[in-house]
Amino acid sequence: MVNSVTNFGRNGLYDWVIQRLSAVILAVYTLFLLGFVIATPDMTFAQWHGLFDQTWMKVFSVAAIISICAHAWVGMWTISTDYITGSTSLRFIFQLVCAAFLFTYLVWGIDILWSV
Protein backbone atom coordinates (compact mmCIF):
# COMPACT_ATOMS: atom_id res chain seq x y z
CA MET A 1 0.00 0.00 0.00
CA VAL A 2 1.31 3.46 -0.88
CA ASN A 3 1.71 5.89 2.00
CA SER A 4 0.99 9.63 1.78
CA VAL A 5 -0.78 9.34 -1.53
CA THR A 6 -2.24 12.83 -1.69
CA ASN A 7 -1.13 14.12 1.70
CA PHE A 8 -4.83 14.22 2.70
CA GLY A 9 -4.73 10.77 4.20
CA ARG A 10 -2.27 8.20 5.39
CA ASN A 11 -2.94 5.86 2.47
CA GLY A 12 -5.20 5.25 -0.50
CA LEU A 13 -8.08 4.07 1.71
CA TYR A 14 -8.30 7.48 3.38
CA ASP A 15 -8.28 9.18 -0.01
CA TRP A 16 -11.11 6.88 -1.09
CA VAL A 17 -13.06 7.84 2.04
CA ILE A 18 -12.44 11.55 1.39
CA GLN A 19 -13.67 11.11 -2.18
CA ARG A 20 -16.87 9.36 -1.04
CA LEU A 21 -17.57 11.67 1.90
CA SER A 22 -17.11 14.77 -0.25
CA ALA A 23 -19.42 13.25 -2.88
CA VAL A 24 -22.12 12.69 -0.24
CA ILE A 25 -21.82 16.28 1.03
CA LEU A 26 -22.03 17.62 -2.53
CA ALA A 27 -25.04 15.41 -3.32
CA VAL A 28 -26.91 16.56 -0.20
CA TYR A 29 -26.07 20.20 -0.97
CA THR A 30 -27.23 19.85 -4.58
CA LEU A 31 -30.46 18.09 -3.59
CA PHE A 32 -31.18 20.74 -0.97
CA LEU A 33 -30.70 23.58 -3.45
CA LEU A 34 -32.76 21.76 -6.06
CA GLY A 35 -35.51 21.17 -3.50
CA PHE A 36 -35.44 24.83 -2.48
CA VAL A 37 -35.75 25.99 -6.08
CA ILE A 38 -38.59 23.54 -6.79
CA ALA A 39 -40.42 24.43 -3.57
CA THR A 40 -40.16 28.15 -4.34
CA PRO A 41 -41.45 28.50 -7.93
CA ASP A 42 -41.91 32.29 -7.73
CA MET A 43 -38.57 32.88 -6.07
CA THR A 44 -37.34 36.43 -5.73
CA PHE A 45 -33.84 37.68 -5.18
CA ALA A 46 -34.81 38.58 -1.61
CA GLN A 47 -35.73 34.94 -0.88
CA TRP A 48 -32.51 33.64 -2.46
CA HIS A 49 -30.48 36.25 -0.58
CA GLY A 50 -32.33 35.40 2.63
CA LEU A 51 -31.39 31.75 2.27
CA PHE A 52 -27.70 32.50 1.84
CA ASP A 53 -27.77 35.19 4.53
CA GLN A 54 -28.38 32.57 7.22
CA THR A 55 -25.31 31.32 9.07
CA TRP A 56 -26.21 27.63 8.74
CA MET A 57 -26.44 28.01 4.95
CA LYS A 58 -23.09 29.79 4.83
CA VAL A 59 -21.51 26.96 6.84
CA PHE A 60 -23.22 24.37 4.60
CA SER A 61 -21.93 26.21 1.52
CA VAL A 62 -18.39 26.38 2.90
CA ALA A 63 -18.58 22.64 3.59
CA ALA A 64 -19.64 22.15 -0.04
CA ILE A 65 -16.78 24.32 -1.31
CA ILE A 66 -14.26 22.43 0.83
CA SER A 67 -15.76 19.17 -0.43
CA ILE A 68 -15.38 20.29 -4.04
CA CYS A 69 -11.75 21.17 -3.43
CA ALA A 70 -10.98 17.90 -1.61
CA HIS A 71 -12.81 15.84 -4.23
CA ALA A 72 -11.08 17.63 -7.08
CA TRP A 73 -7.64 17.36 -5.46
CA VAL A 74 -7.89 13.59 -4.98
CA GLY A 75 -9.18 13.21 -8.53
CA MET A 76 -6.57 15.44 -10.14
CA TRP A 77 -3.78 13.82 -8.14
CA THR A 78 -4.95 10.43 -9.37
CA ILE A 79 -5.12 11.64 -12.96
CA SER A 80 -1.65 13.19 -12.76
CA THR A 81 -0.02 10.08 -11.30
CA ASP A 82 -1.82 7.76 -13.74
CA TYR A 83 -1.27 9.71 -16.96
CA ILE A 84 1.78 11.97 -16.45
CA THR A 85 4.37 9.26 -15.99
CA GLY A 86 7.32 10.43 -18.07
CA SER A 87 8.36 13.55 -16.22
CA THR A 88 8.25 14.07 -12.48
CA SER A 89 8.73 17.80 -12.89
CA LEU A 90 5.81 18.05 -15.34
CA ARG A 91 3.62 16.12 -12.89
CA PHE A 92 4.72 18.43 -10.08
CA ILE A 93 3.92 21.54 -12.14
CA PHE A 94 0.51 20.10 -13.05
CA GLN A 95 -0.23 19.37 -9.38
CA LEU A 96 1.02 22.80 -8.34
CA VAL A 97 -1.27 24.52 -10.88
CA CYS A 98 -4.21 22.39 -9.71
CA ALA A 99 -3.48 23.22 -6.08
CA ALA A 100 -3.22 26.94 -6.88
CA PHE A 101 -6.56 26.92 -8.70
CA LEU A 102 -8.26 24.98 -5.90
CA PHE A 103 -6.83 27.28 -3.24
CA THR A 104 -8.00 30.33 -5.20
CA TYR A 105 -11.45 28.78 -5.59
CA LEU A 106 -11.64 28.04 -1.87
CA VAL A 107 -10.57 31.53 -0.76
CA TRP A 108 -12.78 33.23 -3.35
CA GLY A 109 -15.80 31.12 -2.38
CA ILE A 110 -15.37 31.85 1.33
CA ASP A 111 -14.90 35.54 0.57
CA ILE A 112 -18.11 35.65 -1.48
CA LEU A 113 -20.13 33.86 1.19
CA TRP A 114 -18.93 35.80 4.20
CA SER A 115 -18.23 39.25 2.72
CA VAL A 116 -21.71 40.73 3.06
Image (cartoon, rainbow, N blue to C red):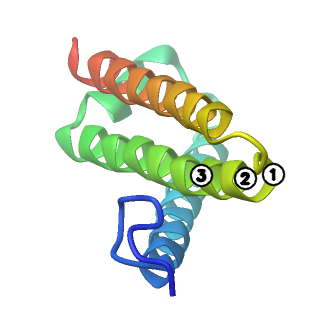
- In the picture, residue 88 is in which quadrant? top right
Circle 3 residues within 10 Å: few <14, some 14–19, many ≥20: some
Q: Could you tell me if the residues under marks 2 and 3 are in contact, i.e. CB atoms within 8 Å? A: yes
> Which percent across, then down, holds residue 69?
47, 44
| Residue located at (53% from left, 48% from top) | 73
| Residue located at (67% from left, 55% from top) | 81
Q: What is the secondary structure assignment of the residue under circle 1?
A: helix
Q: Tell which of 85 and 13 is nearer to you.
A: 85
> Which percent across, then down, holds residue 1?
51, 88
Circle 2 residues within 10 Å: few <14, some 14–19, many ≥20: few
Residue at the bottom extreme? 1
Q: Which residue is mark 1?
A: 83
Q: Considering only vertical position in the picture, is 100 above or below 27?
A: above
Q: Which residue is mark 3?
A: 77
Q: Considering only vertical position in the picture, is 23 above or below 17?
A: above
| Residue located at (78% from left, 45% from top) | 86
Where, quadrant-wise, is the C terminus in this rendering? top left
Tell me the kind of residue under disc 1. Answer: Tyr
In this rendering, which labeled residue sits more in front, label 3 or label 1? 1
- The dot on residue 17 is none
Residue at the top extreme? 116
Tell me the kind of residue under disc 2. Answer: Ile
Q: What is the secondary structure assignment of the residue under circle 3?
A: helix
Q: Is residue 95 left or right of residue 58?
A: right
| Residue located at (26% from left, 27% from top) | 53
Between the C-alphas of marks 3 and 1, the distance is 10 Å
In this rendering, which labeled residue sits more in front, label 1 or label 2? 1
Tell me the kind of residue under disc 3. Answer: Trp
Q: Which residue is mark 2?
A: 79
Q: Could you tell me if the residues under marks 1 and 2 are in contact, i.e. CB atoms within 8 Å? A: yes
Q: Is residue 62 left or right of residue 32?
A: left
